[in-house]
């Protein structure tokens, strides 16, 4: 069935001078792998379409049993104005892209995840201050993956710990190492159920931001069997936490 689809570029491998193999997360069709032809001519250069987290429109024959699709007539669906020229936002996109590439299974379909990612890319592009964005983004990813943190017994204004195994906040220190101590846990609780404009203005010391990032990555690893080392994590720490 030939259909016009919208997709988010998740992973790119150079196959030859004129071909790329890409993974693209599509609304309705999920994560698909496909072949695309690239052009380097000045008039028809399309390589910019296949950068991490670019949102493209394209045509393909989506057969139920066809796991490798052809990607025809690709075009930019949503222009981005700041990500490509802002080194901090570019580093964040590379990090987000790596997390998605290592956590989304082939053919995984989740329309709400697609819409969240599409909207979050636009929010990052427009963000005035993106220092908290990766923390908010990771928190929301856990919502779509099914293990969003719960407040549970800890009152909003009281000190707390975050139990990563249980995915909840608690007054008492967990009797295992997979938890956040009181200061980072209390700040993490601030991010619960916030929209990005609210999360953007939360004031965090760089050391706390670093602890929260490491904690959220550990939280993902505990709940996702297929999450390996995030190589771009060091770059993100260098940009936002030093």
Image: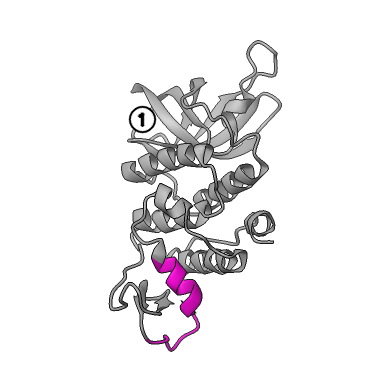
The answer to which of 2 and 45 lies nearer the viewer is 45
180 in the magenta segment: yes
Q: Name the secondary structure under disc 1.
A: loop
- Establish if 53 lies above or below 185: above
- Establish if 1 lies above or below 132: above
Side of 182 relative to 82 (left or right): left
Q: Which residue is mark 1?
A: 63
* Magenta region: 172-189
The answer to which of 153 and 129 lies nearer the viewer is 129
Instruction: State the residue lying farthest toward the top.
Output: 43
Q: Residue at x 69, y 57 (%)?
A: 238
The answer to which of 171 and 109 lies nearer the viewer is 171
Q: Find residue 141 and report its image quarter.
A: bottom left
Q: Can you give x and y, in whole percent of width and height, for residue 46 in the image?
A: 61, 21
Side of 199 relative to 19 (left or right): left
- Establish if 159 lies above or below 69: below
For the question of whether residue 133 can be seen, the reply is yes
Q: Can you give x and y, in whole percent of width and height, for residue 184 in the image?
A: 50, 72
| Dot 1 alpha-carbon crowd within 10 angstroms: few under 14, some 14 to 19, many 20 or more | few
Q: What count of labels does the image hold?
A: 1
For the question of whether residue 24 can be seen, the reply is no
The answer to which of 163 and 14 lies nearer the viewer is 163
The colouring scheme, among rainbow, by chain, secondary structure or one colour, is one colour
Indicate the quadrant containing the C terminus: top left, top right, bottom left or bottom right: bottom right
Q: Can you give x and y, in whole percent of width and height, for residue 25 in the image?
A: 44, 39
């Amino acid at each position: 069935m030939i259909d016009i689809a919208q997709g988010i570029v998740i992973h790119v491998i150079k196959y030859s001078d004129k071909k790329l193999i890409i993974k693209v997360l599509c609304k309705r069709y999920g994560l698909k792998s496909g072949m695309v032809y690239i052009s380097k001519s000045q008039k028809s250069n399309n390589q910019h379409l296949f950068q991490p987290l670019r949102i493209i429109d394209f045509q393909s024959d989506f057969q139920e049993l066809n796991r490798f699709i052809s990607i025809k007539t690709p075009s930019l669906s949503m222009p981005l104005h700041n990500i490509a020229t802002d080194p901090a936002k570019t580093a964040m996109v590379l990090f987000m892209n790596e997390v998605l590439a290592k956590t989304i299974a082939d053919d995984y379909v989740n329309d709400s995840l697609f819409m969240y990612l599409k909207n979050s890319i636009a929010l990052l592009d427009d963000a005035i201050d993106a220092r908290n964005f990766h923390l908010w983004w990771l928190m929301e990813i856990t919502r779509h993956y099914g293990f969003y943190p719960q407040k549970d017994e800890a009152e909003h204004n009281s000190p707390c710990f975050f139990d990563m195994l249980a995915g909840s906040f608690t007054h008492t220190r967990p009797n295992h190492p997979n938890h956040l101590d009181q200061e980072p846990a209390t700040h993490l609780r601030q991010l619960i159920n916030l929209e990005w404009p609210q999360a953007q203005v939360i004031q965090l010391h760089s050391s706390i931001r670093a602890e929260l990032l490491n904690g959220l990555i550990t939280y993902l690893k505990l709940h996702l069997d297929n999450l390996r080392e995030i190589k771009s994590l060091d770059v993100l720490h260098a940009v936002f936490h030093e």
